[in-house]
Amino acid sequence: MDLVLQSEVFTLPFVSFIVGLVFCLLGRRILAFIVILFGFLIGYSWGTALLVSVLSISLHQYPWLPWAAGAAGAALGLLAWKVSMFFAGFVIGLFVIRGVFPALPGLAHTAIALAVGLLVHIYRQPIVALITAMAGAYIAAGAAVIMLTDVNFFHALRSYVAQPRAQMVTGAALTLIFSIIGYKFQSRGLNT
């Protein structure tokens, strides 16, 4: 029980597990907020760095610049969300396909992500529910495998199954289970 209480063992995987489950179960409802949040963060960090570099100015002269760039990024994120779901579907599709099939060539990743983006644009609500359930499930399952490894779960299975295979099978099974549960939870009330 002491191992469970040690925060350094579970802090990041536990947080990733919770974030993955939240995205798996509520992704359709919180995706707009996430797009706006990431727009703000990108504007705040990269937008500010770009403006400082291009305009040859110092942040000491303009301390409000990161906040203004962040607000502009959030506005662009909101605009992108309102104008088209294609880009959000493309990004999520690329994340999922690269995570699930990392050995595929980049062109295949791009083609599948484009198809996902097109499907999200046409069938917004059910596709967003499916893709966010899969993305959240992938994050949660990966974190669960890390936590199970940290408590030597797979080491205990060593005599029954090869350890790397057990981790891969467990991760795939958890991803599938979480994806199905997440999609079912998110699709309640959809007219599909």
Image (tube, rainbow, N blue to C red):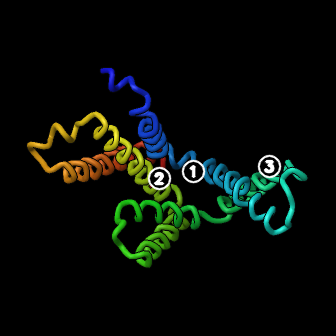
Whether the residues at callouts 1 and 3 have beta carbons within 8 Å, the answer is no
Residue 5 placed where, x, y %?
38, 23
- Disc 1: which residue: 31
- Disc 3: which residue: 67
Whether the residues at callouts 1 and 2 have beta carbons within 8 Å, the answer is yes
Residue 86 placed where, x, y %?
57, 67
Three-letter amino acid code of the residue under disc 1: Leu
Three-letter amino acid code of the residue under disc 3: Trp
Residue 80 placed where, x, y %?
67, 62
User: What secondary structure is marked by label 1?
Assistant: helix
Numbered tag placed on residue 132 in the rendering: 2
User: What secondary structure is marked by label 3?
Assistant: helix
Q: Quadrant of residue 50?
A: bottom right
Q: Quadrant of residue 158?
A: top left
Instruction: Identify which residue, 140 or 117, lies in the foreground.
Output: 140
Numbered tag placed on residue 14 in the rendering: none
- Write the residue at 29% across / 49% down: 171
Three-letter amino acid code of the residue under disc 2: Thr
Question: Extreme left residue here?
Answer: 159
- Write the residue at 87% across / 50% down: 60
> Is disc 2 surrounded by few (<14), some (14 to 19) or many (20+) residues within 10 Å?
many
Horizontal placement of 113 versus 33: left or right? Answer: left
Q: Quadrant of the N terminus?
A: top left
Horizontal placement of 172 versus 166: left or right? Answer: right
Of the numbered discs 2 and 3, the one sitting upstream in the chain is 3
Question: Extreme bottom residue here?
Answer: 107
